[in-house]
Image (cartoon, grey):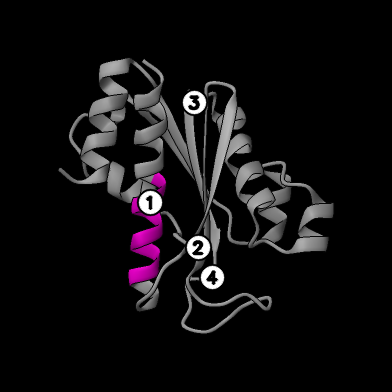
């Protein structure tokens, strides 16, 4: 079963809603989830926040963190996940930020992606190193974010 099918099924079974905030994945999580029949019952929406200004103004990411650490860090992923959950009212949210490649950005290597999931009063962040083409890195990041959401929801019985 694909991560998106498993996530939609789990969200449906638990009567939970989901939203996402995406940077390097550029809407890929939302696109994959909306392929699944029945997603409309659980998926509230997403924000593609490629620019710093959107991360800050729409998702509430700290301008100070962006200025000091850049967009590709654990703190930004965490704030993106929490921001989109607050913005949409979703029970569960996921976020991605990182360097899809092909080359480095902001001094960070291609394939460095932070994924975060917010649910049940806590937010979990993972630092990932993905390899492959730009599209492969993006696909791996989207899958990882959904897999993290599945794991975190499954832990809360």
The magenta segment is 136-145
Q: Where does residue 118 sit, x and y in percent of width and height? A: 54, 33
**SS state under label 3:** loop
Which is more toward the observer, 35 or 3?
Answer: 3
Image quadrant where one finds the C terminus: top left
Q: Residue furthest left?
A: 1
Circles 1 and 4: CB atoms closer than 8 Å: no
Q: Where does residue 9 sit, x and y in percent of width and height? A: 23, 28
Which is more toward the observer, 49 or 108?
Answer: 108
The residue singled out by tag 3 in the image is 90
Instruction: Determine if residue 2 is in view.
Output: yes
- Distance between the Cα atoms at labels 2 and 4? 7 Å
Query: How would you classify the magenta stretch by its main secondary structure?
Result: helix
- Determine the residue positioned at 34% across, 34% down: 150
User: In the picture, residue 11 is in which quadrant?
Assistant: top left
In magenta segment, residue 127: no
Circles 2 and 4: CB atoms closer than 8 Å: yes
Q: Which mark is residue 24?
A: 2
**Of callouts 1 and 4, the N-terminal one:** 4
- Distance between the Cα atoms at labels 3 and 4? 26 Å
């Amino acid at each position: 079963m694909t991560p998106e099918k498993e996530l939609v099924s789990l969200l449906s079974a638990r009567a939970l809603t989901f939203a996402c905030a995406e940077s390097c994945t550029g809407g890929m999580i939302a696109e994959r989830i909306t392929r699944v029949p029945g997603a409309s019952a659980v998926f509230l929406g997403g924000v593609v926040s490629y620019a710093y200004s959107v991360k800050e103004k729409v998702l509430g990411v700290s301008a100070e963190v962006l200025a000091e650490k850049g967009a590709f860090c654990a703190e930004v992923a965490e704030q993106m996940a929490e921001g989109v959950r607050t913005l949409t009212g979703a029970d569960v949210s996921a976020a991605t930020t990182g360097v899809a490649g092909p080359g480095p950005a902001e001094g960070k290597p291609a394939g460095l992606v932070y994924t975060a999931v917010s649910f049940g009063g806590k937010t979990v962040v993972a630092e990932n190193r993905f390899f492959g083409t730009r599209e492969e890195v993006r696909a791996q990041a989207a899958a990882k974010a959904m897999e993290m959401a599945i794991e975190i929801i499954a832990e809360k019985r």
